């Protein structure tokens, strides 16, 4: 059995190495996606249109406003003069965000009491509004940090250098969209490569009639599929490595968690992806159909439903159920935990389970359709 | 029991369409068994059932001692099969194809090496191990495919139109190989639509539209199935002559072969003179007329037009 699996794997590898076009697709496609998603599509919100109603008009209030404007994130539209203008500016979309500084702002600061600033954010685009709110929170937190620092040092208390005042520290790291996108990107690339390569390789045997010669030998279907999967799993791992390396080089993303769990969850994900590839190869009878179906089935759900770009929590209930059609959804949770948070298995073990269930369902469906198709062929 | 294959009422339906209709035959050990019929007659479908690739709708066959209905996997282990479509990998070298299929058939190590050499030798490809299979000409490809199909030295070999589209010389070489296997005791079942190839077979069956219409060895077929005498007439105008002859009461069959016409007459018409007389009576000039032994082609045309003996009786 092992001998036959090895023979299939070796043969598949040889064919792959001779297929220049396929090799090009396998290795250039990820680079292409990486460039598109990493640079072209930048989900960071910058140059937020900010208006200020400064009722205090003190050095402190001006200092606070300057601290907002000193970054790329906020651009000052104008200073407002009255309450009435607030409505007008928001309704007419002259500003995305308005800061209202109360007249007792500086007094409260001097009295060491809680100074309150009101921020009005245009909530039409919920995503952007959330991001703006996070920026505002971070900016305010940083400003008060600064105040504390000055306050303490004015009384001769030295702060340890662990309090960093670098502007980069202002913002919630999870809001950095490139960081946030990399796990989804890895998932999307891996699933496309796995589904397309495995389904093409099976359909090619059907189309050229070589499957007949295999069928007449006593090789079993699971042996054939395992042998075929091995080279593509290796390739998928190489791809994953390339993306991780690129993520580190270009976007400074390091693997915070365990490499072992990264490997294991990737293996689970590839099993599920190969399951989809097998399903596609059972349905498709020509290479064109296999390529098209494989790309669509793997790409679209991974992009739209997996939580890669659009958060699953903000999807309507029905679509949230529907999002289970792609294993990328589960894999992304694993990756974000391992890569960004450095979390352990206790956080994402459920996702591994879901991927196993997913694989079983897809493979069973594929074999059901395969049997049905054979019967149909016999009776059509 | 001395049979490699015993088929009983093999039937295959695709929906309402019956591709193979209750076909029964027996193949003796070590013989070359020919399977003749036009395109779409049901040859490939029958072979695929015998190889355990397709389940019969009804009927059964015992191949190498195993039932294709109940033990298709055991059948697969004792046979070699070369499908009608070329089914080696064009993007592998000759050597890689041989090694791959050898391993798939469970060979390894020294035995695999030995068989690889043997396959290269019989397919006459020693020294070309590293050539890409896709770069080989058709006839050589077919020989390699045959070599690969027998790499595990099966007792029974199925060849589905192995020589179609191959030039006459390669075809001759191919048949030499088939004979060699047969001499070594392998049973060979081969389909073809070249009638002249039927002469190389020990026994043949003819199928038409899924039904078996004749069986026997080629020599016997020629005498047994034609109840009359065969003549060959040469003329400038065969089409016109055919129309004239068709009206004659003593004629069973007329068929055209280029400038020649083959005529099957009823038994009592034994002499060419009588035929010649008929032609002159009808004011038709013929160049030459000879009595011949009917060819297989005559037999088949006769059978296709008049049905098999059995069908006539029913
Ligand atoms: N899988 C199938 N589904 C439907 N019809 C089929 C199938 N395979 C073969 N046939 C039909 O059965 C008939 C016999 O085909 P086949 O056995 O390939 O003929 P041959 O090999 O003698 O040329 C043909 O009419 C063909 O169209
Ligand atoms: Mg055929």
Image: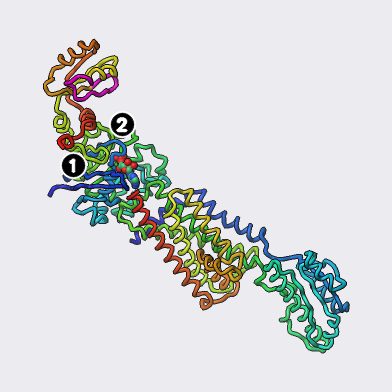
Q: Residue at x 33, y 50 (%)?
A: A379
Quadrant in the rendering for residue B205: top left
Query: Mark 1 sits on what residue?
Result: B31
Instruction: Please determine whether, in this image, residue A167 is positioned above or below residue A21.
Output: below
Tally the marks. Answer: 2
Secondary element at image label 2: helix
Residue B143 in view: no
Marks 2/1: CA–CA distance: 23 Å
Magenta range is B246-261
Please tell me which of labels 2 and 1 falls first in the chain.
Answer: 1
- Image location (x, y in percent) of residue A317: 56, 69
In the image, B79: left or right of A80?
left
Q: What colouring does the structure picture have?
A: rainbow
Q: Is residue B255 magenta?
A: yes
| Residue closest to the far left | B268
**On screen, A375 above or below B302?**
below
Residue A128 visible in the picture = yes
Residue A334 included in the magenta stretch of the image:
no
Pick the front one: A226 or A254: A226
Splitting the image into 4 quarters, where does residue A308 fall?
bottom right
Give left or right: position of A118 versus A201.
Answer: right
Query: Pointer 2: residues within 10 angstroms few (<14), some, or many (20+)?
Result: few
- Disc 2 target residue: B168
Query: Residue A161: image x %, image y %?
Result: 73, 81
């Amino acid at each position: 059995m092992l001998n036959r699996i090895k023979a299939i794997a070796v043969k598949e590898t040889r064919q792959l190495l001779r297929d220049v076009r396929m090799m090009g697709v396998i290795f250039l496609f990820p680079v292409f996606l990486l460039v598109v998603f990493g640079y072209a599509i930048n989900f960071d919100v910058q140059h937020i249109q900010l208006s200020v109603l400064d009722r205090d008009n003190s050095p402190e209030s001006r200092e606070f406003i300057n601290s907002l404007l000193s970054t790329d994130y906020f651009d000052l539209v104008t200073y407002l003069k009255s309450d009435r203008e607030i409505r007008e500016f928001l309704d007419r979309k002259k500003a995305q965000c308005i800061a209202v500084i109360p007249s007792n702002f500086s007094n409260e600061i001097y009295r060491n009491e809680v100074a309150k600033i009101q921020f009005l954010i245009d909530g039409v685009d919920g995503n952007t509004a959330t991001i703006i709110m996070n920026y505002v929170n971070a900016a305010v937190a940083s400003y008060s940090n600064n105040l504390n620092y000055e306050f303490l040092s004015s009384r001769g208390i030295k702060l340890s250098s662990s309090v960093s005042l670098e502007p980069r520290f202002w913002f919630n790291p999870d809001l950095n969209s490139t960081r946030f996108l990399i796990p989804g990107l890895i998932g999307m690339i891996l699933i496309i490569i796995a589904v397309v390569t495995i389904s093409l390789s099976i359909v090619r045997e059907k189309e050229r009639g070589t499957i007949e010669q295999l069928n007449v030998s006593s090789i079993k279907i699971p042996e054939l599929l395992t042998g075929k999967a091995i080279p593509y799993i290796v390739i998928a791992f190489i791809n994953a490595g390339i993306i991780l390396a690129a993520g580190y080089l270009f976007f400074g993303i390091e693997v915070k968690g365990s490499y072992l769990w990264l490997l294991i969850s990737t293996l689970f994900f590839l099993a599920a992806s190969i399951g989809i590839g097998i399903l596609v190869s059972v349905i498709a009878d020509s290479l064109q159909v296999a390529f098209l179906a494989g790309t669509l089935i793997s790409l679209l759900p991974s992009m739209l439903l997996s939580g890669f770009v659009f958060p699953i929590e903000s999807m309507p209930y029905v679509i949230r159920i529907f999002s289970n059609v792609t294993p990328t959804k589960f894999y992304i949770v694993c990756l974000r935990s391992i890569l960004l948070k450095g979390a352990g298995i206790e956080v994402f073990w459920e996702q591994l389970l879901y991927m196993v269930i997913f694989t079983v369902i897809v493979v069973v469906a594929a074999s059901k359709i395969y049997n049905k198709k054979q019967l149909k062929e016999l009776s059509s | 029991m001395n049979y490699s294959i015993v088929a009983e009422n093999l039937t295959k339906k695709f929906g309402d369409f019956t591709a193979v209709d209750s076909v029964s035959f027996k193949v003796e050990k070590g013989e070359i068994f020919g399977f003749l019929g036009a395109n779409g007659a049901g040859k490939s479908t029958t072979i695929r059932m015998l190889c355990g690739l397709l389940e019969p709708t009804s009927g059964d066959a015992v191949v190498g001692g195993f039932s294709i209905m109940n033990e298709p996997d055991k059948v697969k282990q004792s046979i070699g099969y070369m499908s009608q479509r070329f089914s080696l990998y064009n993007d592998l070298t000759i050597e890689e194809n041989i090694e791959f299929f050898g391993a798939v058939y469970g060979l390894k190590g020294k035995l695999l090496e030995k068989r690889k050499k043997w396959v290269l030798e019989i397919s006459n490809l020693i020294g070309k191990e590293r050539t890409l299979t896709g770069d080989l000409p058709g006839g050589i490809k077919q020989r390699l495919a045959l070599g690969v199909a027998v790499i595990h030295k099966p007792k029974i070999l199925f060849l589905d139109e192995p020589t179609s589209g191959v030039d006459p010389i390669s075809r001759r070489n191919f048949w030499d190989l088939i004979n060699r296997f047969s001499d070594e005791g392998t049973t060979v079942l081969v389909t073809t639509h070249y009638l002249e190839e039927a002469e190389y077979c020990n026994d043949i069956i003819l199928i038409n539209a899924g039904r078996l219409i004749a069986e026997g060895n080629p020599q016997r077929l020629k005498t047994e199935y034609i109840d009359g005498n065969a003549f060959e007439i040469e003329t400038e105008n065969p089409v016109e002559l055919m129309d004239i002859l068709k009206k004659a009461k003593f004629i069973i069959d007329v068929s055209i072969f280029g400038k020649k016409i083959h005529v099957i007459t009823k038994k009592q018409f034994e002499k060419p003179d009588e035929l010649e007389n008929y032609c002159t009576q009808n004011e038709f000039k013929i160049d030459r007329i000879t009595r011949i032994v009917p060819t297989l082609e005559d037999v088949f045309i006769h059978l296709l037009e008049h049905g098999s003996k059995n069908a006539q009786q029913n």
